[in-house]
Amino acid sequence: MQSILESKVVVLVPPQVKNNGAFDGNTYVDTSEANEALFLLAVGTTDVAIGSGNDSTEPFIEECDTPGGSYEAVDGAALSAVIAADDDKVFGIHVDLRRTHKRYMRINAPTAGNNTGGALCAVCLLSRRAKATFDAAGMGLAELVKA
């Protein structure tokens, strides 16, 4: 049985409120030692639509062979619609990395529409890692308390 301690958390979009434009700090995740990735988009109070690249395209995951290369959409890795009127909910996109995928993945340019603002934080949870360590640093955490 796999332990949750074999997982790693990577912050892709730090918590923030955005009005009319791309969320700051969107970055990629290196998936090289994992078998699965779960991208989580946590939405706070929002009165705008949140999408990829604009506020009318559903958020989706994209991949690339290098961190700074040209990213392409991952087949089937998109939400069914933009995030709108969905205060305090978490949305997830699961990617099975055992299939043929490129090493680096990210959320395509999360963008908020023009109104008061949208609150978002996005993380990727990597699981079934080949070289898992069971400490805070190995799990991508600032601190780990085991009780």
Image: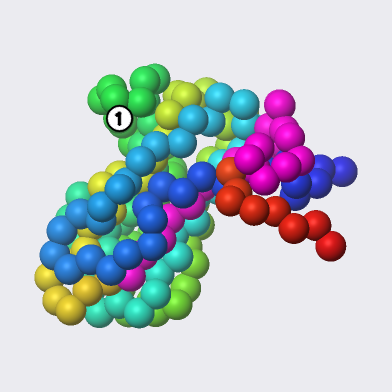
- Residue depicted at 60% across the width and 49% down the height: 141
The answer to whether residue 76 is left or right of residue 32 is left
What is the span of residues highlighted in magenta in the rendered image?
119-139
In which quadrant is the N terminus drawn? top right
In which quadrant is the C terminus drawn? bottom right
Taking the magenta stretch, the answer to whether it contains residue 133 is: yes
Q: In this view, does 83 lie above or below 130?
A: below
Q: Is residue 144 above or below residue 70?
A: below
- Coordinates of residue 24 in the picture (x, y in percent): 26, 52
- Residue depicted at 30% across the width and 77% down the height: 46
Question: Which residue is nearer to you in this view: 82 or 109?
Answer: 109
Residue 89 in view here: yes
Residue under numbered circle 1: 71
Looking at the rendered structure, the secondary structure element under dot 1 is loop
The answer to whether residue 79 is left or right of residue 109 is right
- Coordinates of residue 95 in the picture (x, y in percent): 53, 41
Q: In this view, does 67 lie above or below 118?
A: above
- Residue depicted at 67% across the width and 45% down the height: 136
The answer to whether residue 107 is left or right of residue 8 is left
- Residue depicted at 30% across the width and 48% down the height: 25
